[in-house]
């Protein structure tokens, strides 16, 4: 009998990480794959990215509307509740043998809570990491304790999950599955990318990926320094849309005003997975506070300036430079990132987040797990004495 595995995706960001695990699960003869799509994937404001999933050939078992049209923390909280209601019906009817979740988005609390009540074992990807400047950190740790199988990106992350009391046999270092694109996907040539995006890449642009800092009461307070620094840059600028968090609309409006005043540059609502990775090959550097700058740019030895506190605590690759949320600090780190000495120092570097083989490791474990009855009973491990 095939193992019914349900996978939840809520946004363009987690879908880019899930693409190759989904491909390998779909191709496995012993797996009945059920893809559940919700939240910003179904929102026109965020590009209706469910169409990308359908175009990639994944049959969607459920499309669940749960994202409120809001720009507040109350809207975020209510979206979790709506998600719980929708998922209770969907998972209650589907009854998968296993539910696969990824990362640390707040809306992932909904499927985890429902699966817990329905006694559905949970597998979680990218636990054990640290991001002190976002509520993601608490979400990630909550998902870890609610899950029964764990796939971490790094060895220190694996050790943190074990230190949280998870049995070592349940915790596997797989690497970040987004990095599988570099090995398995055909990236676009410069000409193909220029045609698709309708931009000129003769002068490599700077890529800006900046999101609200959700741990702060004012989630966009650090953005003032960023935009003041960007005003002083001569290079072409390309912006990615922020996540669906409190403050995202304010950031979008500010970006649009900035680009209108500047008279050049682009803001992309959504970049397909391969398009985004192809763009990382062509830009001069990345600036912002995205986890992509932490986990993915190292595979290209792309100089990356991480701004502010959102990613505080993450493991750093050699290509990352941390800037305080001040104009002077951001400009100083950008200048350092441009320098010949820094570029030379990161040539041939290794990305600590993985080697491009994560999906095969994840699928090998998922397809050889013991039955749900055994997975659900977690035994605590004794804490080590200081």
Image: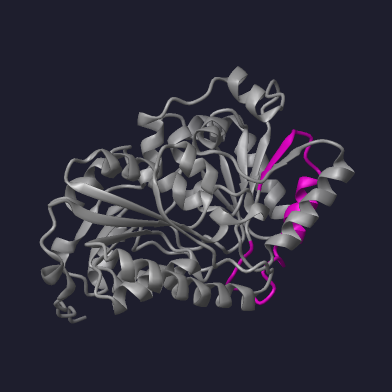
Q: At 54% across and 43% down in the image, what residue appears?
A: 51
Q: Is residue 236 shown in magenta? A: yes
Residue 332, given in percent of the width and then of the height, sits at 68, 47
Q: Is residue 350 visible?
A: no
Q: Is residue 276 visible?
A: yes
Residue 238, given in percent of the width and then of the height, sits at 69, 39
Q: Is residue 295 left or right of residue 374?
A: right
The quadrant in which residue 324 appears is bottom right
Q: At 18% across and 63% down in the image, what residue appears?
A: 170
Q: Is residue 309 shown in magenta? A: no
The quadrant of the picture occupied by the C terminus is bottom left
Residue 382, given in percent of the width and then of the height, sits at 15, 80
Q: Camera-side residue: 182 or 386? A: 182
- Total labels drawn: 0
As drawn, the residue found furthest toward the front would be 93
Q: Camera-side residue: 180 or 86? A: 86
Q: Is residue 60 left or right of residue 282?
A: left
How was the colour assigned to the protein in this rendering? one colour
As drawn, the residue found furthest toward the top would be 191
The quadrant in which residue 379 appears is bottom left
Q: Is residue 122 above or below residue 217?
A: above
Magenta-drawn segment: 212-240
Q: Is residue 323 above or below residue 268?
A: below
Q: Is residue 191 above or below residue 11?
A: above
Q: Is residue 23 left or right of residue 166?
A: right
Q: Camera-side residue: 313 or 379? A: 379
Residue 164, given in percent of the width and then of the height, sits at 27, 73
Q: Is residue 281 above or below residue 331?
A: above
């Amino acid at each position: 009998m095939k193992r019914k595995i349900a996978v939840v995706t809520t946004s363009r960001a987690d879908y880019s990480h899930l693409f190759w695990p989904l491909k390998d699960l779909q191709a496995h003869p012993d797996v009945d794959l059920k893809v559940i799509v919700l939240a910003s994937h179904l929102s026109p404001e965020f590009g209706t990215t469910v169409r990308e999933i359908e175009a990639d050939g994944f049959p969607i078992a459920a499309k669940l509307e749960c994202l409120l049209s809001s720009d507040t923390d109350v809207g975020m909280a209510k979206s979790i509740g709506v998600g719980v209601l929708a998922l209770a019906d969907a998972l209650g009817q589907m009854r998968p043998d296993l539910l696969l979740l990824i990362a640390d988005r707040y809306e992932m609390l909904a499927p985890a809570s429902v699966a817990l009540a329905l006694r559905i074992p949970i597998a979680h990807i990218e636990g054990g990491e640290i991001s002190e400047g976002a509520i993601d950190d608490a979400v990630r740790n909550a998902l870890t304790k609610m899950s029964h199988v764990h796939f971490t990106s790094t060895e220190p992350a694996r050790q943190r999950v074990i230190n949280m009391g998870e049995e070592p046999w349940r915790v596997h270092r797989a690497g970040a599955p987004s990095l599988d694109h570099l090995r398995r996907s055909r990236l676009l040539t410069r000409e193909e990318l220029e045609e698709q995006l309708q931009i000129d890449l003769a002068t490599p642009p700077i890529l800006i990926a900046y999101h609200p800092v959700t741990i702060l009461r004012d989630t966009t307070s650090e953005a003032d320094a960023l935009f003041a620094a960007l005003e002083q840059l001569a290079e072409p600028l390309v912006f990615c849309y922020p996540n669906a968090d409190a403050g995202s609309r304010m950031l979008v409006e500010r970006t649009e005003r900035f680009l209108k005043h500047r008279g050049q540059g682009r803001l992309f609502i959504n970049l397909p997975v391969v398009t985004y990775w192809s763009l990382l090959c062509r830009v001069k550097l990345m600036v912002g506070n995205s986890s992509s700058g932490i986990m993915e740019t190292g595979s290209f030895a792309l100089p990356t300036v991480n701004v502010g506190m959102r990613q505080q605590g993450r493991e750093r690759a050699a290509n990352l430079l941390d800037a305080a949320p001040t104009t002077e600090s951001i400009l100083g780190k950008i200048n350092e990132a441009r320098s010949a000495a820094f570029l030379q120092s990161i040539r041939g570097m290794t990305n600590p987040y993985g080697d491009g083989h994560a999906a095969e490791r994840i699928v090998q474990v998922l397809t050889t797990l013991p039955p749900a009855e055994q997975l659900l009973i977690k035994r605590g491990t004794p804490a080590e004495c200081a």
